[in-house]
Amino acid sequence: MGDEASGSGEKTGVVLAALSANAVIAVAKFVAASVTGSSAMLSEGIHSLADTSNQALLLLGAHRSKRAPDAAHPFGYGQELYFWGLIVALVLFGLGGGLSIYEGIHQLMSHSSELGDPMWNYIVLGVAFLAEGISWTIAVRAFQRTRPEGRGLLRALNASKDPRVFVPVGEDTAALAGILVAFLGVLLSHQLQAPWIDSAASIVIGLILAAVAFYLARETKNLLIGEGADPRLADRIRAAAEGCDPIRHIGAVLTMQLGPDEVLLNLEVAVDPTLTVEQTARALQDLEAAIREEAPEVTRIFSSLEIDRDTVSGGYARRGRRRSLGSRVRRA
């Protein structure tokens, strides 16, 4: 429990670090954009404002997802964090990507030829890159501590079940890329006396944000519609269950992610048909205790008991000689 609380606090710290950095950077970018008239800098200001709003939404989602189960939501509110993660993606797409692309197109069509002193842009972009780099480092380090051994960074990010991890990493990566694009836009537009380059940079920044928003929306959508837990977790559960003596065979191991640290398990097992009812009940208790010890993130267990080993085939029960004692629910 202590390790879980520590991990949750660290992930919240990642979100707070990103929120603080983005709030300060957003103000600085808007000031620089108003002084210099840079379209790319204005897009970066919009980007940082969207990121700041998104971190606040993630904190709200994390807080609300910790509510205890009740009659209306017997499995708890863990998936509410995924809902707010989806809202984050929509905000990033609409407010960040959409407005940046609009600003770039608007400036291109207005044929503006005024170029202000770029020094403010360079200073703000330099400070922003440093702040975003620190925030990105904090997010990646927190993610690395949860990354399974032997799994690549990108693959592990795709498999992550916690928006407090993959959202800051995705947004900070987009922020660093956007700052580089804005720097090149400001630099080239002044060096070549071509204001359209600055406007084009704004459009590129918007496209980067839209791409990251699409990625985040896809990840959170999968979690919202009942994505299963990591396959490695299912393998650990199966191994723990097969180590219990009264268990003859393990059929389907079905999981669903209820929250970043909450997994629902539906387990199909076959036991020795010579066991009494009391012995069978004790076998199930031992089985569930072994699973909870191996995988503490499993918070709900439904056991479907098959008396005849031969009725379980290919991970799913066939019709015929099955005698089921029904579903038993255990809350970890």
Image (tube, rainbow, N blue to C red):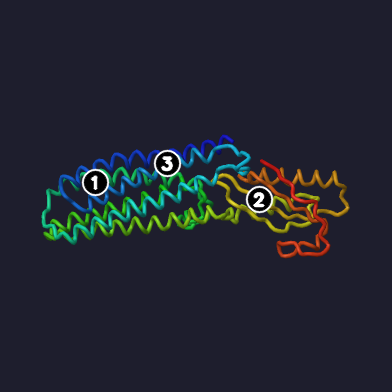
Looking at the image, tell me whether mark 1 or mark 2 is earlier in sequence order.
1
The residue mark sitting in front, 1 or 2, is 2
Q: Which mark is residue 14?
A: 3
Q: Pointers 3 and 1 in contact (CB under 8 A)?
A: no
Residue occupying the point 69% across, 54% down:
238
Q: Is residue 73 left or right of residue 60?
A: right
What's the residue type where badge 1 is placed?
Gly
As helix, strand or loop, the secondary structure at mark 1 comes to helix
Residue 250 place in picture, x, y as percent: 73, 56
Q: For mark 1, does the 10 Å Cα neighbourhood hold few (<14), some (14 to 19), or many (20 or more) residues?
A: some
Disc 3 residue type? Val
Task: Report, in whole angstroms, how far the alpha carbon at label 3 lies from the one at label 1.
Answer: 22 Å
Query: Considering the numbered disc 2 on the image, is that residue within a helix, a strand or a loop?
Result: strand
Q: Of the two numbered discs 3 and 1 on the same chain, state the one appearing first in sequence.
A: 3
The residue labelled by disc 2 is 265
Mark 2 / mark 3, whichever is N-terminal: 3
Left or right: residue 47 compared with residue 325: left
Q: How many marks?
A: 3
The quadrant the C terminus occupies is top right
Q: Measured from the top left, where is residue 126 in percent x and y?
A: 24, 46
Return the residue at label 1: 126
